[in-house]
Amino acid sequence: MNKDTYPFQVLKLSLVFLLLVFSSFSGIEEKFSRINASNEENLLENSSRIEKDGWILLHLKGKPEALGFQQGSLLAEEIDDAFSALKPFLEHTTHRDWAFYHDAARDIFWNHIEKEYQDELEGIAKGLRSKGKKYDRYDITALNGYMELSEYYVPFLENQKHPGSSLNKAPGNCSAFIANGKYTEDGKIVMGHNNWTDYALGERWNIILDIQPEKGNRIFMDAFPGFIHSGDDFAENSAGILITETTITQFNGFDTHGVPEFMRARKSEQYSSSIEDFIRIMMDHNNGAYANDWLVGDTKTNEIARLELGLKNHKVWKTKDGMFFGSNFALNPKLIREETNFNPKDSANSPNTRRVRYEKLMEEEKGKINIESGKILESDHFDPLLGVNKGNRCVICGHVDTDPKGCPEWDWAPFYPGGAVQGKLTTAGLASHFQFWAHMGHPCGEDFIASTFLHLHPEYNWQKDYLRDMKAYPWSLMDANSPQ
């Protein structure tokens, strides 16, 4: 070999070697890519997404990680959009950035969550990452617990620093009822709920989950994007248990060593086969967050119950012939006195005025309550304080955005963009077929137009980047057995 050509031969051989190595790595990468795609395809097996009348219905089935991956993948855009609203919303309203919530979820919640649900939360993060969305397990945990952290943990911290400074923070979300016996048309259980919350988040509360887990009961419920629980709450399961609630307004209390409410709620939705099961699960290591009056029914026994669950106090009422309803008022005097800043004698506040209206309507509809009368109940606009039909804070289908007083009971300023954002109704018969009626948007049928609202109320321009129109869709029958 000519010594002058030797370096070129070496270079040539080196290039050939590098090409072989590159080809080998490319082959390995392609192989791993195929394996990863195959694994993702297996995880997505038996899952599907259907859109109907403003709702997104997901069928999820499998082991915990698969359930999570399916939701994260099928709802990647909606979950990402939810974060795009939630992060700036919480930063403005609580003066804490997302890093605070991410770290709180890691430090306070994660080790109190059972592995089954850790795997599902991790699965959602993996499903999101498969679609190019960069979130981790603590982001998804904070998302699921955002109400607990922002409305209970943050006030808890503030009250530690400045006692009495945050006694008005716990919200008054939702109106609901459950009835049976002499109150319903056929004597069997009827349950209804409309979700009150901030429009910026509530207009995104349009997910319906049909979850068939590896263990426990099948669940059919509404949810916020990325939730493993219902959250607002409205659920039915294959053991015939029906669950809803309304929050206890102006509640004060939080236990950093307790189990997150969202995990207990999901566990009760999945593993309750009786009212007693539900009560036991919800009370097990209760952290006090998202304190509610839970309305529960067992279609097997035709019994209904009200569990009023604070942190220090709880009380249970049961009946096979009656009704319970909620509009954010507590009934137990001891709980009210020791754990809230609520005035049960204030006839002008939202919980008490809605309570008066519910009492009248439930008696008027006694013996007739069914799906159609439930739709009327959930869309009611009569203000008993003024004696007129008017959309405001005092009606069951709330419209605080039109109320010059706002909702001071939970620190909503005048004309705050919040109120009833959707509604659901079910009966024992519908639940036996995994069905319920749902209405996206104000149950009364009125639209909320963001640009019109912000023109009238520029003080809320801090929401302009993520406050959207909330159109009222028709009532629609949701069916877990709809074609996938």
Image (spheres, rainbow, N blue to C red):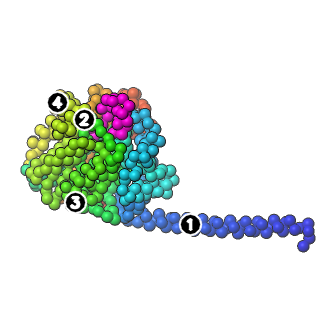
- Residue extent of the magenta highlight: 151-174
Residue receiving disc 3: 273
Q: Earlier in the sequence, mark 4 or mark 2?
A: 2
Q: Earlier in the sequence, mark 4 or mark 1?
A: 1
Residue for point 43% across, 33% down: 95
Callout 2: SS: loop
Instruction: Kindly identify the amino acid type of the residue bearing the numbered disc 1.
Output: Phe
270 or 37, nearer to the observer: 270
The answer to whether the residue labelled 3 contacts the one labelled 4, judged by CB atoms less than 8 Å apart, is no
479 part of magenta stretch: no
Residue 412 visible in the snapshot? no
Q: Residues within 10 Å of mark 4 (few under 14, many from 20)?
A: few
Callout 1: SS: helix
Q: Earlier in the sequence, mark 2 or mark 1?
A: 1
Residue receiving disc 1: 32
Residue receiving disc 2: 340
